[in-house]
Image (cartoon, rainbow, N blue to C red):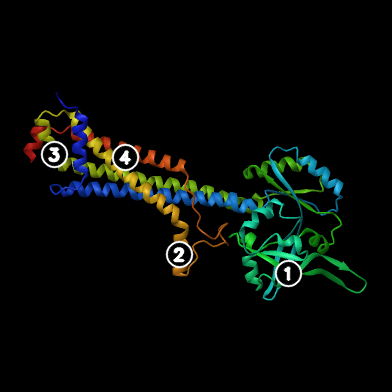
Amino acid sequence: MVESPFPFSRYLAVRYVSVGKTSHLVSFMSAVAVFGLSFSVAILILVLSVMNGFDREMRQTVLGIVPHITLFTDENLKQSEWDSITEQLKINPELSSISPVVQAAGIVSGPAGNKGVLINGITSIENKDGLALDNYFTSGRLQDLKSARWGIAIGESLAKSLGAETGDQLTLYSSTISINPIITLANFRKFDVVGIFRVGTKDLDEAYVIVNQKAARALFKLRSPHNALHLRLKDALLADHVALELDSLLPPALSVESWTLQLGAVYDNIRFSRNIIAFMLWLLVSVAAFNLVVSLMMIVRDKRGDIAILRTLGASPKTVMRIFLWQGCLIGLIGTSLGLFFGILGATYVTELAGWLESFFSLQLLSADVYPIDYLPSKVEWLDLFYVVMGVFFLAFIATIIPARRAAKIQPAEALRQE
């Protein structure tokens, strides 16, 4: 009974890939091809995971705190008018929550200086923005704003620039003024720092403060219950579309502003950079696949004598072709598997590694002045892993065809004469 050529081809392919004493060149070229594929796969997975991490942090962290759409007005609207506006908003199916706030620009003064800030007066931690922000407090709690009417929560960067800590007092100046017959005075009030948060975003950590809504109304001498609404959407990326709809629906006294006005360019740059970097890394994978072609061509040249003997013993060109097809597929499988392992390992610990490098070399890899966050995030997407593995293995298989066809065309007599 004649044995099927596939097991025989597979056996020889495994012998050629494995390290052997009789053919150091074959083993070396196989190792180079495996290393090239594994390195490119690992880098591709690592970088894609980091870009996915940036996308996740933008969606869940920054966009989890910043309102997707803000409606605000300078007019003193009555509660009944705000209720009518809220009922109009509830018709839109894209809205997930509506939070009334007092929002205005102001100046906060501390022992070490002054800083212009955006003041947000919220009713309670049921406010969706405050509920998300509560997870990022490094000192104190947001709930303390309920019991401390003249309490204030500030970002870590702002606290450092003002020289303030939890329990200290800060002076908050409003943009409104008090007019009396003698002199024009700015409205201000001392607030106790009840909490400090750190999101890792400059716009939030340096210029975002939260106070009790009653305190904000008193500070700004606001007769209306609030002057703005923070809207959250089911999909934050639809903010511009929904904002246009609301702008045409709501009264002219209300201004509509989406999160993209402040952070849209940053988010678009992240997504654009992800596509460009992914394309460049796929070029790196293509180079590794080309290296596989060169390696297999050299292996075929080194094994001309073995191929001639196999052909003399009765092996068909298809059998010879299968040997090198199996060898290329084995190299692709080993390289992809190693790259997958080290890529997932690197993506899992890249945040900790970046933090260690920053502390060890006293440098800052990401600056909050440039990027939306000041740390290196990572998120492994299983769909990305599937596409990477299938794509790399496909390229490895395509790269194997040319050397395998060339090996099948070798004539025994000519090969033995050259040996």
| SS under mark 2 | helix
Is 30 on the left or on the right of 266, as rendered? left
Q: Residue furthest left?
A: 417
Between circles 1 and 4, the one closer to the viewer is 1
* Cα gap from disc 1 to disc 4, whole angstroms: 64 Å
- Identify the image quadrant of the N terminus: top left
The image's mark for residue 304 is 3
Whichever of labels 4 and 3 marks the residue nearer the N terminus, that label is 3
Residue visible at 21% across and 50% down in the picture: 28
> Which amino acid type corresponds to the residue marked 3 in the rendered image?
Arg
Percent position of residue 234, x then y: 65, 42
Is 55 on the left or on the right of 90, as rendered? left
The image's mark for residue 282 is none
Q: Is residue 167 above or below residue 14?
A: below
> Which amino acid type corresponds to the residue marked 1 in the rendered image?
Asp
Instruction: Tell whether label 2 touches label 4 (CB within 8 Å).
Output: no
